[in-house]
Image (spheres, rainbow, N blue to C red):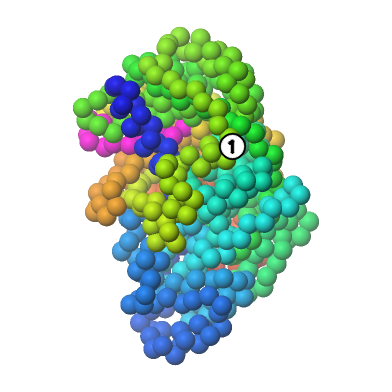
Amino acid sequence: MDRRKFLAVSLTTTALSACGGGSGGGNGSIASSSSSVSSENGIWGQLATQLSGTVLRPGQNDYELLRRVYNTRYDHIKPVAVVRCTSVQDVQATLAFARSQKLAIVPRSGGHGYAGYSTTEGIVLDLGQMKSIQVGPGTATIGAGARLVDIYDQLGAQGVGIPAGSCPTVGIGGLTLGGGIGIVDRAYGLTCDNLLAAEVVLADGRVIECDAQNHADLFWALRGGGGGNFGVVTRFTFKTHTTADITTFDSYFDFNDFTRVMSAWQAWPETLPNHIWAQAIPGWNSPSSSPALQIRVFCIGSIADMTPHWQHFLQQAGVTPLWVSQVTEPYRSVMLSGCGELNIPACHVQGDGQGQYPRNAFAASSDFFAKPIPEEGLLVLKQAILDSQLAGNYGMMIMDLMHGAIDELAADETAFVHRGALFSVEYYTWFRAGTANNQVDAAQVWVNSFRQTLSPWTTGGAYVNYIDPLISNYEVAYYGANYPRLQQVKATYDPDWLFKIPQGVKPL
């Protein structure tokens, strides 16, 4: 593969890496069909008079634009209404309306949920207008509808940041509630680890503030228990960190060296300091060229800080990269690199203000690994990639190193159970917007099949923010031993199961 092709693959990876997001709300069936609810303007007009926001119904201006989520795979789902909330009172009124009319309701922060659980045939509770960002001494208070592009932009301008994801259009809500993996989490922990407090509207309409001392059981569940399960979080308060320049090493290796490079990459955390984070990304997107193996490394520091660790990695691998780049940039620039050439207003999903960020269709699944995959397993993985390419199934695996600050908390200290994992992997494939659902659904089957292929070496766990509707034992995969406690929290705060999603936490 020549350098131009390398760059094309790299840009694709940067643009699409983890652009799904939190588990969102749910598309569970409506408790009573929408036809049983009065469709006359009266009942919806009554709701509208209680709101500072707006109610959008089918046929009204902007409904078609604002009902859609990021993944075009779910464009066929048409809510009975989209309620654009601008205040906590709007959320309370809409929840009361949904209860009285026996309608399914799902909260939406950014609309990037992998399985379409942030849309519904009931009511979409759109929090996108509740996006204020306020920075205080050591903290940031962020509305649930804020997108990462605005968070990185506004916090970065003040020299601080929070650990979060790589896709600029993802909403802070689902990301935080599912955990939050990103390029500085080995240094600062997951997004949810930096959560200090949350404002939550419960199913019965009560508004509570929860933190480590107040409603501590709910606060525990909000840190990794998945979006759309326990209430509508309207505001988050995070611990912030002073930012510093980040050095990025981006490289490609011959796919024939796959096992040697991956063996060295998996062993790297034994010597790697916490301020350095790395990805391994096998990608295959063409029938006519060999798969690519990309290694991306991010160091909070200079090229001089990173170079000894890079040289050690190359020595352990015993191979030379086909191509490598090294660059040091301001923290804010690195975090906004997913925007490409788009400015801040344009770096939002099409339909969100001046947004020009394109939607697409995608399918994904995930795994966690507690130990390095042995050579036998790496050979199985390499062959599975080649077989996938031969079958015309194109995609990538995004492998993220873990450990570091993530492991400073025990598996039961928050709902995020995957502490101690060496790395996570996202199996990912994407299509042009509007690709037929049967094609994307078929892709969901083959990305999920990697979980079975690699099962001898995985923990069996999966990341709830890469939610996969084909995982049958999702309770154990997403939450492990923490699931019974999550059920207790669900029974306390949503006993009537108002917030119901297909792979959600069920009350006891």
293 on left or right of 368 = left
- Up-down relation of residue 483 to residue 117 (above or below): above
Residue under label 1: 331
86 on left or right of 284 = right
Dot 1 amino acid type: Tyr
Residue 23 in the image, given as x and y percentages of width and height: 49, 54
- Residue 183 location, quadrant: top right
Residue 333 in the image, given as x and y percentages of width and height: 54, 38
Q: Please name the residue shown 67% across and 63% down the image.
A: 199
Residue 493 in the image, given as x and y percentages of width and height: 64, 66
- Up-down relation of residue 406 to residue 499 (above or below): above
Q: Please name the residue shown 51% across and 63% down the image.
A: 128
- In the rendered structure, does residue 261 fall within the stretch colored magenta? no
- The answer to whether any part of residue 261 appears in the image is yes
Relative depth, front residue between 293 and 359: 359
Q: Tell me the quarter of the image containing the C terminus.
A: bottom right
- Residue 118 location, quadrant: bottom left
- Residue 455 location, quadrant: top left
Q: Dot 1 surroundings within 10 Å: few (below 14), some, or many (20 or more)? A: many
Relative depth, front residue between 153 and 463: 153
Element type where label 1 sits in the image: helix
Q: Please name the residue shown 63% across and 26% down the image.
A: 301
Magenta residues, as a range? 388-399
